[in-house]
């Protein structure tokens, strides 16, 4: 899931960090002054990427700021590739003839493997918008072709497992929904039965989220503008999924709650608190407002996440994590049901999978915000094991648990007499209108120069 996190799964929902860290490295002494300098690498907020490595070096004639890992080609002493989009360049040793300006890192390297993304780059060789917190190497170059992007999913880059941790779940969920909707796994009803309309909406939200995250992580190096467009679409797909989940809750889960039954709630208030309150009007208002409020939240969350990519946003990770938590508030009645009406006793499947889902979400949010483990040892987890991959895995587990209790709610819905029957306008109609609104939001941000960097 481009994520809430990443520019992401993903991207996940892209990775941002608001903390600061410094890495000091002694540089070689100058032959004339014999004074030892140092190179300073500062992890600081960057408007384009939220947090990145500062590409400036504080000693004349210094070495490259970061030594390459074993097996990586090293740059010449006293020469430094400039930061793309920045104004600070490496300085040559005193008295040395000026060397030719190195090629921009966003251009095509002079030699590359046919059909592949070319040599992998380090953080100081890519545009600032590409740099992820504490990820030092494994970057693909800008302006790869579509063929090279596709080939990169089989090569060890820092995006490879971001793709596979959502592509494999995409296949699993596609098979699951195929069984439920097309192979009569949901009951003895045809796939076009009105009772399955909320499940169709929910399935489209889940599959679109994983598919869009995979697309964003694979093709994010085509160009800066397309990179922004893909991650805007990733944010929109997450909002779309959040609203689709609410549609499924509204028809399959909420009608079975005692909390939303006026007589049961009035009786509870009278027995526990001594209140004589007719709850029918408030509960009717709540039922009428659930879908419109969830719709508004989906649009607002997309706007907030798109704005978080602008240069004026100081804490993009925190903003994205918060705004994607907001739609989860639509499941509050289930939590209140477990506190007031013994949900564990009369619906143990919903109780267990509901709370386990939110545990996985908390773990996913922890990795997305903390940037652990790469924060502890920058460079060690560039390819395998960094926080965005863990974020993808735990979000997959959360949706997997959610599907369990949505399917259970569907079975109860088909067996009982639901107070509200799904309609096309109240399900698919809402989803189509949301797609239109989210499309307008993305178009608006792609036309704002400050929100989308052009090549």
Image (tube, rainbow, N blue to C red):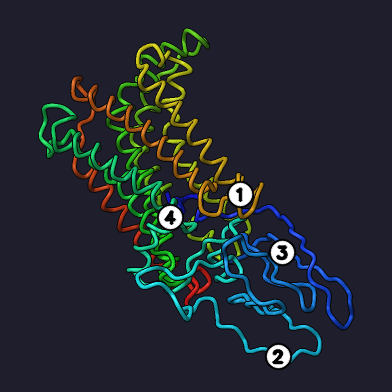
Residue occupying the point 47% across, 76% down: 454
Number of residues whose C-alpha sits closer than 10 Å to that of mark 3, classed few (under 14), some (14–19) or many (20 or more): many
Which badge, 4 or 3, comes first in the chain's sequence? 3
Residue occupying the point 59% across, 46% down: 369
> Do we see residue 301 in this rendering?
no
Residue 128's x, y, as percent?
Answer: 58, 68
Tell me, for residue 160, which label it has, or none.
Answer: 4
Front-lying residue, 370 or 236: 370
Residue 49's x, y, as percent?
Answer: 57, 63
Residue occupying the point 27% across, 47% down: 430
Number of residues whose C-alpha sits closer than 10 Å to that of mark 4, classed few (under 14), some (14–19) or many (20 or more): many
Helix, strand or loop at mark 2: loop
Return the residue at label 3. Answer: 41
Total numbered labels = 4
**Which of the 4 image quarters holds residue 352?**
top left
> Do we see residue 188 in this rendering?
yes
Return the residue at label 2. Answer: 98
């Amino acid at each position: 899931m481009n994520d809430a996190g990443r520019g992401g799964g993903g991207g996940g929902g892209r990775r941002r960090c608001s903390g600061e860290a410094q890495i000091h490295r002694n540089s070689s002494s100058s032959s004339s002054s014999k004074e030892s300098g140092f190179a300073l690498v500062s992890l600081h907020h960057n408007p384009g990427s939220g947090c990145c490595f500062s590409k400036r070096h504080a000693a004349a004639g210094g070495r490259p700021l970061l030594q390459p890992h074993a097996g990586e080609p090293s740059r010449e002493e006293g020469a430094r590739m400039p930061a793309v989009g920045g104004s600070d360049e490496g300085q040559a040793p005193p008295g040395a003839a000026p060397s030719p300006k190195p090629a921009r890192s966003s251009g095509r390297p002079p030699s590359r493997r046919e059909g592949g993304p070319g040599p992998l780059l380090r953080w100081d060789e890519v545009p600032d918008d590409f740099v992820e917190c504490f990820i030092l190497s494994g970057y693909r170059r800008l302006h790869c072709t579509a063929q090279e992007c596709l080939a990169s999913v089989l090569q060890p880059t820092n995006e490879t497992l971001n793709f596979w941790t959502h592509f494999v779940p995409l296949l699993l969920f596609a098979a699951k929904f195929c069984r439920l909707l097309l192979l009569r796994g949901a009951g003895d009803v045809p796939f076009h039965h009105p009772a399955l309309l909320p499940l169709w909406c929910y399935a489209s939200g889940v599959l679109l989220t994983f598919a869009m995250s995979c697309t964003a992580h694979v093709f994010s190096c085509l160009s800066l503008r397309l990179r922004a467009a893909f991650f805007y679409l990733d944010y929109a797909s997450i909002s779309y999924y959040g609203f689709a989940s609410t549609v499924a809750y509204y028809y399959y889960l909420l009608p079975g709650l005692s909390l939303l039954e006026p007589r049961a709630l009035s009786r509870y208030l009278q027995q526990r608190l001594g209140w004589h309150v007719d709850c029918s009007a408030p509960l009717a208002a709540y039922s009428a407002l659930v879908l419109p409020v969830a719709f508004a939240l989906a649009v607002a969350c997309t706007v907030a996440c798109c704005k978080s990519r602008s240069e004026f946003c100081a804490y993009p990770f925190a903003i994205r994590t918060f705004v994607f938590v907001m739609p989860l508030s639509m499941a509050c009645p289930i939590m209140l049901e477990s506190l007031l009406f013994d949900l564990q006793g009369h619906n143990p499947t919903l109780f267990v999978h509901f709370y386990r889902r939110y545990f996985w979400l908390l773990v996913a949010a922890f990795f997305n915000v903390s940037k652990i483990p790469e924060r502890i040892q920058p460079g060690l987890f560039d390819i395998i094991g960094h926080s965005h991959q863990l974020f993808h895995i735990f979000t997959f587990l959360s949706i997997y648990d959610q599907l369990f209790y949505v399917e259970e709610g569907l079975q109860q819905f088909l067996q009982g007499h639901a107070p509200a029957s799904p309609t096309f306008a109240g399900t698919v109609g809402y989803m189509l209108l949301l797609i239109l609104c989210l499309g307008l939001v993305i178009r608006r941000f792609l036309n704002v120069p400050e929100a989308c960097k052009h090549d």
